[in-house]
Image (tube, helix red, strand yellow):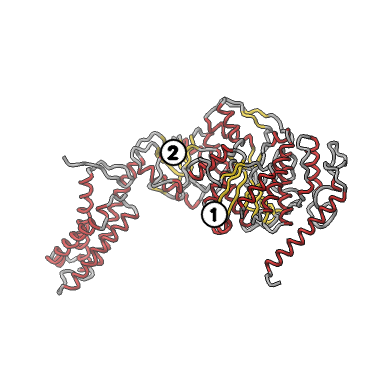
Amino acid sequence: MPTHGTERGAGGHRSGWPLRWTRRTWPLVDAAIWVLAVYGAVWLRYDFRVDLLLTTGTAVCAALAATLQVLAGSFVGPYGVRHRRGSLEEIADLARTVLLVALPFLLFTLLIYPPPVPRSTAVTSGALALLAMLAARFVVRARDARAARNRVADRRALVFGAGNAGTRLVRGLLAEDDCAVQPVGLLDDDPTKSRLRIEGVRVLGARADLAELAREHTVDLLVLAAPTAEAGVLRELSEAAADAGLEVKVLPSMNDLVGAPTAGDLRDLDLTDILGRTPVHLDTALVADHLAGKRVLVTGAGGSIGSELCRQISRFTPSRLFLLDRDESGLQATQMSLTGHGLLDSDDIVLADIRDEVRIEAVMAATRPDVVFHAAALKHLPLLESHPGEAWATNVLGTATVLRAAAAAGVGTFVNISTDKAADPTSVLGMSKRLGEQLTAHYATTQIGRYVSVRFGNVLGSRGSVLHAFTAQIERGGPVTVTHPEVQRYFMLIPEACQLVLQASAIGADGEVMVLEMGEQVRIAEVARTLIRLSGRADIDIIYTGLRPGEKLAEELFGADEGRRGTAHPLIDCVSVPPIAPQTLTRDMIDDRMRVLARLRGLVSRAVATDPVLGPNAIGVVGGQPPDADGTQGATDSDAPDTLESAQRENTARAVRAKTSRSARQDNPRT
């Protein structure tokens, strides 16, 4: 029994013809076309005289061309390959085959005298044959595409995006056997695409027409096939689709797909789609030059930001990548994502607490990193309001410890990961991270290495983020708790944030705070409503609990007195912060909540943005005395005399002069 199969037609669905019969059909069709093309070319050449057309020479040449077409097409042409009818690949194969036929045909007419047909016949008939072959295939492709558009499917869909992604999706859906999704039309806001057709599927309108078109064409599905669309556009489409009763699916990035997209590749819309942004374009050469072959250490490597930093840094082939954290489970998870195992048996895995001065100094001395990314921190705002001593011990003193140990080890670049809450801080978290920026700026003035901070807002998907909290509340049946109807925050995807951190670390100038472009702030209540809508639940309520101590309605990326400046990257700006000397910090008041709060407020509010060598209050606090809990000026936490502050300023001034002198010697080695 012969084996029968089917071949994909123009639309890609199976035509139902036996495969062997179909493979024989096209060579026969093309051979017949060559016969007709030869007779047509001769007829044209002889001004339509039939008596000169019906000759033995014409018949011989027509048979020769037909035979060559079948042979060439079978060995190097389209007949041995299952091309999609009318595809560019089939067109290229046909053109090559026709050329292989026309050249021997032309040579034959040139070598025979008298020629059996006019010598121009080879060229003219070749052109006619190629056009006729293409026309035949396009007719078949149009017929099958029409049949695919008219078939009955489970879902009728509008596709938003008539660009490359939308085009490939429509063709893939029409080509898929028994596809459950039928594309009935496209939406695109580009007016130049208003009359575009893709496999017969028309652009019906723009996103503003979604509800009307959904009713008119009885659509129950909206597919987003615009990978570069802004998050605001996707939010608008998601809301409009919900109002119209449409389910929303998303086509993944073309980089994540293998082959033509199908209905099985479509995924549900999630929060990262409507809060994320267009992909970040890195200057990979600059980042690679900064990291390749270097010894890199990441603190907080077991956390959300630290682990993603490690994954991205590893792609730039550092000579060593050290992972430091006090969370052994977090370290294991990060190692698993990097190496495929979590054996924790590598010297590159460092279990240490940044609050342990002796341990951190020993680690830095042993690893001798060229680049340090300091991501270890406490970050939960309400918890740190209740326990400010922990913020002081980790975010302030811990950062000072890491800075001091890194400087002693001769680090080349130190990158401090900060937060938007450090701009005009009102919370313990913001003040502690602000001091981290100021400490980093101090080391920039006193050490040879480059010390920069990177400031950005909330990241989606990090541990303890609002995304996880809301999802858990929805799974429990609600309610979802939001502090205030108008509270809004910046959001960024973790990979995007880390990409920009790497870019900022490569371009940041010594002592600057690099501020990542965060887009527009999003209302937290809108995030909650979106998650509820995406969950499919209609019985979840939102309740408002009121702003918590230290919390703002909206965050700022830049302080009121900070001069925003551009950088070499369009998504990164920079500001300067007043440096603060680590000698002004004390370590004996972690358990005294009021003293910690007073110290934080005093250090942040009294530091002024001037050169540390100028003015008596450039570093630390006025006279070395922070305000007491009641707001009055009292004794310092260490009861140090005023002369200590003067000594500290003098030490800093000497360090600045020393750094300037060393830099001058490096720039001018002969001096």
Please identify the residue farthest to the left as the structure is shown: 56
Residue, disc 2: 157
Q: Position of residue 487 (x, y in %)?
A: 68, 37
Tell me: 132 left or right of 273: left
Instruction: Give, as a three-letter code, the residue at label 2.
Output: Ala
User: In the drawing, what numbered circle is on residue 319?
Assistant: 1
Q: Quadrant of the C terminus?
A: bottom right
Q: Position of residue 410 (x, y in %)?
A: 66, 56
Foreground mark, 2 or 1, reads: 1
Of 331 and 249, the residue lying toward us? 331
Measured Cα–Cα span from mark 2 to mark 1: 51 Å
Residue 33: which quarter of the image? bottom left
Location of residue 501 with respect to 590 vertically, above or below:
below
Q: Residue at x 27, y 45 (%)?
A: 7
> Closer to the N terminus: mark 2 or mark 1?
2
Location of residue 642 with respect to 472 vertically, above or below:
below
Of 600 and 176, the residue lying toward us? 600
Tell me: 43 left or right of 9: left
Residue 299: which quarter of the image? top right
Of 383 and 569, the residue lying toward us? 383
Q: Residue at x 54, y 28 (%)?
A: 537
Q: Position of residue 511 (x, y in %)?
A: 70, 55
